[in-house]
Image: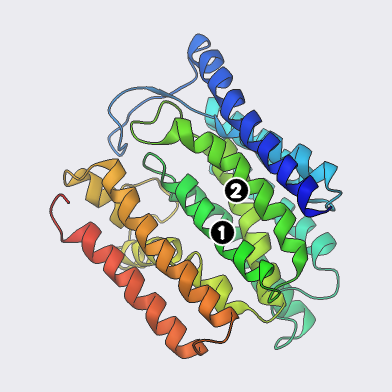
């Protein structure tokens, strides 16, 4: 696919996502498919959910058009199960079993000669560790989708970083097509999801997105770009990881829904959804810049990791300790 074809495809994805989400909003309202606020919720009024099925469908069809392997099938299964969960609340074990199955399929078909750590680990430890990380990222991406626009903005930042690293020839050019498709499709949805959100992506959007982005990041790690694969999503990794550790120490059930992430605490302390997303997005711009400097060998690995840690710590500081900005 040449640059002109990809540009046209991106514009089509954006337009279909923008218009399709608007149409979905009317249908969801008519059928009363709402996310009802609960004690842990960070929104106050019932809001249509499962809107992510629109941009995920667009991504699936675009990947099929671009002839990209088995990814569309994996995404379709995850999307179908997730939208059922959005509507009927499937048990955690049903969801988790499907996630394990799809990740197993992904590893077998997308990493046939060894997975993300094939340069340093034997085959089976490599496969097991890659599968664990893939499964973890898929679920943390879902857990972190708790306020207006946060996961849409995180997705755009990660895609931008992967695109730049691939564009400058550091990663395989293969990455460019899927990240452009994802970026354009999610950007169209983001118009409706910005604060105050008219529609939520729901599990139907966040779960397949987590699977797809985890695949692209793991693929980069398999190319030796593991530092970049860590840096780009490092705010999500840090917030979810620290929160999980704190819950484990306190003896809480880590699989239960909660509102203890730093971004959730920020909103509950009185900060506006938009302000929280802006500060995270500003940090993500720095993380993308750091990842690109690593790719271009402007800074070394350890300085990059230290810089990313400082950026993430600054984001958390603003979320946790600063009053309204």
In the picture, measured across the screen, residue 287 lies left or right of residue 16, that is: left
Q: Earlier in the sequence, mark 1 or mark 2?
A: 1
The residue sitting at 65% across, 73% down in the picture is: 129
The tag on residue 160 is 1
Along the line of sight, the residue nearer the viewer: 88 or 63:
63
Q: Quadrant of residue 197?
A: top left
Q: Is residue 77 left or right of residue 245?
A: right
Residue 139 placement (x, y as % from top left): 54, 53
Q: How is the image coloured?
A: rainbow
Residue 77 is at least partly visible in this image: no
Q: Which residue is mark 2?
A: 183
Q: Position of residue 248 (x, y in %)?
A: 36, 65
Q: Secondary structure at mark 1?
A: helix
**Residue 57: x %, y % from top left:** 70, 34
Q: Is residue 110 visible?
A: yes
> Crowdedness of circle 2 by 10 Å Cα count: few (<14), some, many (20+)?
many
State yes or no: discs 1 and 2 in contact (Cβ < 8 Å).
yes
Tell me what residue is drawn at x 80 percent, y 62 percent: 110
- x%, y% of residue 5? 80, 46
- Residue at 30% over, 39% down: 40
Q: Secondary structure at mark 2?
A: helix
Callout 1 crowding tier (Cα within 10 Å): few <14, some 14–19, many ≥20:
some
């Amino acid at each position: 696919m040449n640059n002109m074809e990809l540009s046209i495809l991106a514009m089509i994805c954006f337009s279909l996502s923008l218009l399709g989400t608007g149409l979905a909003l009317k249908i969801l309202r008519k059928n009363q498919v709402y996310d009802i606020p609960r004690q842990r919720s960070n929104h106050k009024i019932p809001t249509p959910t499962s809107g992510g099925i629109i941009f995920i469908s667009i991504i699936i069809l675009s990947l099929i058009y671009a002839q990209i392997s088995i990814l569309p099938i994996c995404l379709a299964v995850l999307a179908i199960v997730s939208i059922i969960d959005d509507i009927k609340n499937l048990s955690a074990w049903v969801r988790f079993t499907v996630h394990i199955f799809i990740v197993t399929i992904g590893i077998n078909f997308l990493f046939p000669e060894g997975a993300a750590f094939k340069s340093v680990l034997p085959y089976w430890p490599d496969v097991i560790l890659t599968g664990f990380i893939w499964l973890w990222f898929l679920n943390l991406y879902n857990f972190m989708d708790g306020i207006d626009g946060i996961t849409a903005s995180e997705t755009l930042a990660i895609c931008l970083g992967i695109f730049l690293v691939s564009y400058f020839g550091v990663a395989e050019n293969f990455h460019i097509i899927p990240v452009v498709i994802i970026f354009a499709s999610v950007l169209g949805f983001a118009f409706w999801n910005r604060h105050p959100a008219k529609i939520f992506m729901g599990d139907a959007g966040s779960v397949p997105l987590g699977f797809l982005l985890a695949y692209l990041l793991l693929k980069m790690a398999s190319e030796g770009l593991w530092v970049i694969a860590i840096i780009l999503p490092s705010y999500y990794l840090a917030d979810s990881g620290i929160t999980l550790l704190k819950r484990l120490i306190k003896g809480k059930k880590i699989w239960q829904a909660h509102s203890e992430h730093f971004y959730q605490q920020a909103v509950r302390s009185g900060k506006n959804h938009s302000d929280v997303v802006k500060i995270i997005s500003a940090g993500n711009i720095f993380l993308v810049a750091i990842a690109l400097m690593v790719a271009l060998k402007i800074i070394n690995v350890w300085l990059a990791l230290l810089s990313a840690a400082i950026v993430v710590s600054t984001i958390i500081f603003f979320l946790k300790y600063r009053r309204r900005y």
